[in-house]
Image (spheres, rainbow, N blue to C red):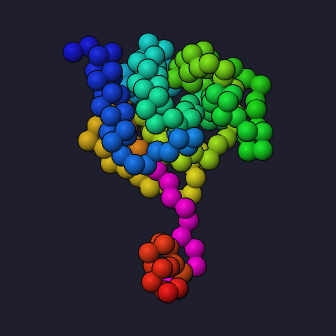
């Protein structure tokens, strides 16, 4: 099987796993960090591929359609891991727009491809995502809400790159006397 078909099969399997979970809500931000170099079996940042980015992008657009999440594609370190999002998801109260257009060698092939194929893209400095995937160890943690919970999927690779998922949950505060679920509250307050 050629690499492009393998990546297509891998991303579709991963997206299908996400769709069966109850972790994504409409309007959530879903961050994607992706090294297409790693997907091809090369060192991160050494041989990006917009052809592979296109395959991954198409699979993730299927996730967006099925769950109504807002996709956020993380740029590489040369753009300080800024993110490409749709302008309709941009909120000036929470996002700072940047004046940059990602390119394969400054932003990465995945972010560059996403920027050119989204309806009305904007690059922002950071977000507080509810969930995401990291393809090729690109370090998406800086864009996840606290508290991040790693997720294990049966689809562990996209091409030759490891893939890790994460979701977030609200912080638990208050110590041992705090109540964390409605069922606990109902028992105590009756």
Of all residues shown, which one is farthest toward the front?
Answer: 190
Residue 157: quarter of image: top left
The image shows residue 106 at horizontal and vertical percentages of: 63, 22
Q: Is residue 101 visible?
A: yes
- Residue found at x 28% / y 24%: 9
Q: Nearer the viewer, residue 15 or 106?
A: 15
Q: Is residue 46 visible?
A: no
The image shows residue 97 at horizontal and vertical percentages of: 76, 32
Q: Nearer the viewer, residue 120 or 132?
A: 120
Residue 14: quarter of image: top left
Asked whether residue 182 is drawn in magenta, I would say: no
- Residue found at x 67% / y 41%: 126
The image shows residue 131 at horizontal and vertical percentages of: 49, 45
Asked whether residue 172 is drawn in magenta, I would say: yes
- Residue found at x 73% / y 23%: 100
17 sits left or right of 86 in the view: left
Number of dots carrying numbers: 0
- Residue found at x 76% / y 30%: 98
- The answer to whether 150 is drawn above or below residue 91 in the figure is below
Of all residues shown, which one is farthest toward the left?
Answer: 1
Q: Which part of the image, by quadrant, shows the N terminus?
A: top left
The image shows residue 78 at horizontal and vertical percentages of: 64, 29
82 sits left or right of 96 in the view: left
Numbered range of the magenta stretch? 166-176
Q: Nearer the viewer, residue 151 or 38?
A: 151
- The answer to whether 150 is drawn above or below residue 118 in the figure is below
- The answer to whether 161 is drawn above or below residue 170 in the figure is above
């Amino acid at each position: 099987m050629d690499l492009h078909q393998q990546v297509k099969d891998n991303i579709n399997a991963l997206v299908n796993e996400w769709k069966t979970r109850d972790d994504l809500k409409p309007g959530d931000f879903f961050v994607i960090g992706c090294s297409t170099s790693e997907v091809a079996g090369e060192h991160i940042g050494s041989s990006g591929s917009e052809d592979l980015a296109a395959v991954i992008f198409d699979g993730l657009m299927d996730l967006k359609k099925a769950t109504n999440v807002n996709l956020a594609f993380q740029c590489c370190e040369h753009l300080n891991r800024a993110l490409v999002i749709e302008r309709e998801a941009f909120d000036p109260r929470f996002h700072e727009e940047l004046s940059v257009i990602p390119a394969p060698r400054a932003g990465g092939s995945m972010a560059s491809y996403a920027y050119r194929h989204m309806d009305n893209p904007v690059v922002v400095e950071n977000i507080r995502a509810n969930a995401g995937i990291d393809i090729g160890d690109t370090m998406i943690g800086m864009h996840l809400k606290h508290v991040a919970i790693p997720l294990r999927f049966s689809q562990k690779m996209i091409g030759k790159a490891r893939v890790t998922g994460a979701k977030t949950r609200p912080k638990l505060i208050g110590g041992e006397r705090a109540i964390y679920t409605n069922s606990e509250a109902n028992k105590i307050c009756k």
